[in-house]
Amino acid sequence: MTDRRVRNIVVVSDLHAGCRVAICPRDGIDLDDGGHYRPSGLQTKLCDLWDHFHHEFVPRVTYGEPWHLVVNGDAIDGTHHGSVTQVSQNIEDQVDMATAILSPIVNHHKCAGYYHIRGTEAHVGKSGQYEEQLAKRLGATKDEHNRYARWLMWFNLCGYRIHFTHHIGTTGSSAYEATAVWKELVEMFTEAGRWGDQPPHMIVRSHRHRFIECRSMGAHGFINTFTTPAWQLKTPFSHKIPGARTSEPQIGGVVIRAGDEDLYIRPFVHRIEPPKTEGGREWAEEQASKSRTRSGSRNSTGSRRSRSRAKA
Ligand SMILES: [Fe+2]
Ligand SMILES: [Fe+2]
């Protein structure tokens, strides 16, 4: 269903359903051979953020109006790179998990349309077949070639032209975090100019599991490129790579809104608290304790001197 009056798009990506450190249905999931998986404590925290995003943040920033939903790839974790971090390596189990997570959002009375973008083949299968399977089951809007999940999408939101696809370059350096994002915008403008097409007002990318927004101004208002956070915590791989190993994962989603004046976004980006510190007290607490000890010994010396002066 496409409703021209809808002014909002809710974007989520990188759910990686099936991974033990990614979002999981709160009540767990029945597995193919009769077992049942229950989410870990950290997965329950992801569920809390998911509920907060969809039930509090989205209604607030959309002013209670309807919205389109775009799942921008990597909804399924798959069986990738020889990893052993999956709840189940049976793809049907993983599709069941993603269905249980997304179905209440897709079937929400404010959801005016659901569109699915294919993610990385290592996760979502060759040609994105696992996401095609999921999007078909959830009843995604089909593209002109009858595919339920597509590689890219142009979307017209109240006259604003928005381009979605999953992939974008990454970086191991915080100093260059914006480089590939801005480069994407430059490349899209170059391509539009070459063929005389209308360039995008907004470009949406995912894959790097981190939010960043690059914004500039053009003849029709803001030109904006952004990347979405994810719903997956640190995997063994992210403990290895530069940038990821030194930071906490960014969890959340983004709402795009065609406002009265211009097209803008409202990001929801959170982190799970870092692991506990082992060993003794924190540096500041240690210093405060030393300072208390020093001032305590001065006071006691001072009071002895006072007593001796009083006797004299
Ligand atoms: Fe991902
Ligand atoms: Fe990806």
Image (spheres, rainbow, N blue to C red):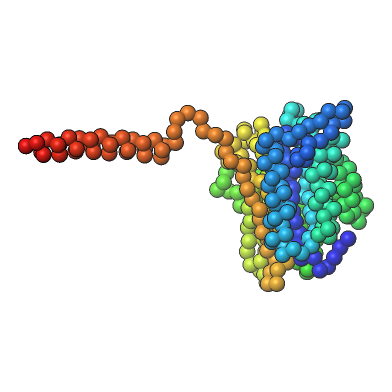
- Residue furthest left as drawn: 312
Vertical position of residue 179 compared to residue 90: above or below:
below
Residue shown at 88% from the left, 43% from the top:
133
Q: Is residue 30 left or right of residue 204?
A: right
Residue shown at 70% from the left, 39% from the top:
44
Of the pair 283 and 160, the residue shown nearer to us? 283
User: What quarter of the picture does the N terminus occupy?
Assistant: bottom right
**Residue 69: % across, % down:** 79, 55
Vertical position of residue 286 compared to residue 140: above or below:
above
Of the pair 81 and 31, the residue shown nearer to us? 31
Residue shown at 74% from the left, 44% from the top:
14
**Residue 307: % across, % down:** 14, 37
- Residue furthest front as drawn: 311
Residue 51 in sight from this viewpoint: yes
**Residue 217: % across, % down:** 63, 67
Residue shown at 12% from the left, 35% from the top:
308
Residue 157 in sight from this viewpoint: no
Q: Is residue 9 left or right of residue 107?
A: left
Quarter of the image where one finds residue 300 = top left
